[in-house]
Image (cartoon, rainbow, N blue to C red):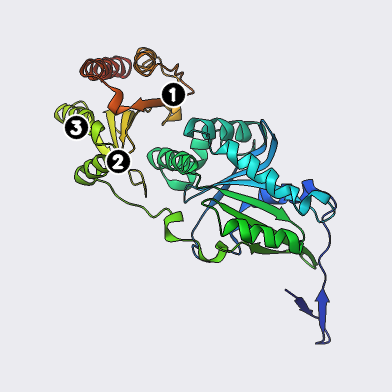
Amino acid sequence: MKILSERPDGTLELLDPEPFPLEIHLQELLETHPSLVLADLVEDPDRQIWTIGWEVGVEAGSIDLLLLDSSARVWVVETKLATNPEIKKQVVGQVLGYASYVAEWTSEDLERIGDTYLSTRATDGPNSLVELLVGELGDEEQAQELLEEAADRLTRGDITALIVVDEIPKELRRLVEWVNSNATFELLALKIEAIPHARGRLFIPTVVGATAMARSAASRRPSRQWDEESFFAELDRNAPEAVPVARRLFDWARANDRLEISYGSGAELGSVIVSNRFGDDDWVPIFSLWTDDRMMGTWTWRSEHRHEPWWVRYIDTLSELSGRQFTPEVGGGFPMSSMSDQDVDTLQGAVLELVDRIDTATGG
């Protein structure tokens, strides 16, 4: 693409790109302006994207940048300059190797990495990933649903590996387009040209990848409002063995006037959230049920209540039921289908005890 500027005398001047002196300059540009990776993708102009990791360590090395977008897609980003000999072949294997590690992460892993990045490097904004997403999406339920959907996509290999360069050699272009047309994941290359300008610099992003300009609607995250009927129908399709446990917990919560049921709006995963309201307008989400057979404790969903002593016994109970050690900083759950009748009784008792403790602490 040629960029022309009109001179005062009416003639045109060809503007030439200026090189990035160091790879870290390209990396820092993307860190500060992650929307550049979307600028050449026209199918979803309302899509948002956020930086959630910098030099993220994995067994094979460190990921230059980790991004998360509003369609619940995780981006593994590797930056390279044309002068780097790895730009032709090695970089593809490198970024795909990193993506293979990311594909094993859970929503808790994403939250932990995002929290670390925001609290140590991006210190002038939110200190946690959930707080960042709440500010962008509007509430904590949507923030947590986005993280859960992102983790679900990772387990299905639905991930974007992105190579960001200042120039794309023919060999790299050919390899990216071939891989991208023969894989379930997405491999893209993004060229960013920086052009000097009177008021600063112009950045010209160009995406290379066979599907980059025609991303399927499935990769977007339109809002879907779930309800009782759609939730149980989807759960029955995904995990029919979990339906009896989910139905028992749902009916019990609905019949208890101290508990409140709401539904998620995830594009792919449906959820039921059981909460307790107290005071004039405060509330605590206690557990959630998901259409992929998960029951999750939700004490991490509201950061202002995460460390309240109310949770201690409840967290211990869920740790015992799941066989995992949860903490106030690390939430999680386990398959509903793994729960016995006695487990359900234990969970219900722990919920009622938790509500009693909240009432005592808040004067409810």
Query: What's the CA distance linking mark 1 and mark 2?
Result: 31 Å
Is 96 or 131 nearer to us in this picture?
A: 96
Q: Position of residue 289 (x, y in %)?
A: 30, 33
Query: What's the CA distance linking mark 3 and mark 2?
Result: 15 Å
Circle nearer the N terminus (3, 1) = 3
Mark 1: amino acid: Arg
Callout 2: helix, strand or loop?
helix
Q: Position of residue 183 (x, y in %)?
A: 54, 53
Residue at 23 percent across and 40 percent down: it is 236
Q: Which residue is mark 2?
A: 238
Q: Which mark is residue 306?
A: 1
Q: What is the quadrant of the N terminus in the image?
A: bottom right
Residue at 52 percent across and 53 percent down: it is 48
Residue at 24 percent across and 36 percent down: it is 240
Circle 1 residues within 10 Å: few <14, some 14–19, many ≥20: some
Residue farthest along the bottom direction in this orientation? 10
Q: Position of residue 222 (x, y in %)?
A: 39, 55
Residue farthest along the left direction in this orientation? 255
As drawn, is 346 to the left or to the right of 220?
Answer: left
As drawn, is 360 to the left or to the right of 21?
Answer: left
Q: Which residue is mark 3?
A: 247
* Occupied quadrant, residue 16: bottom right
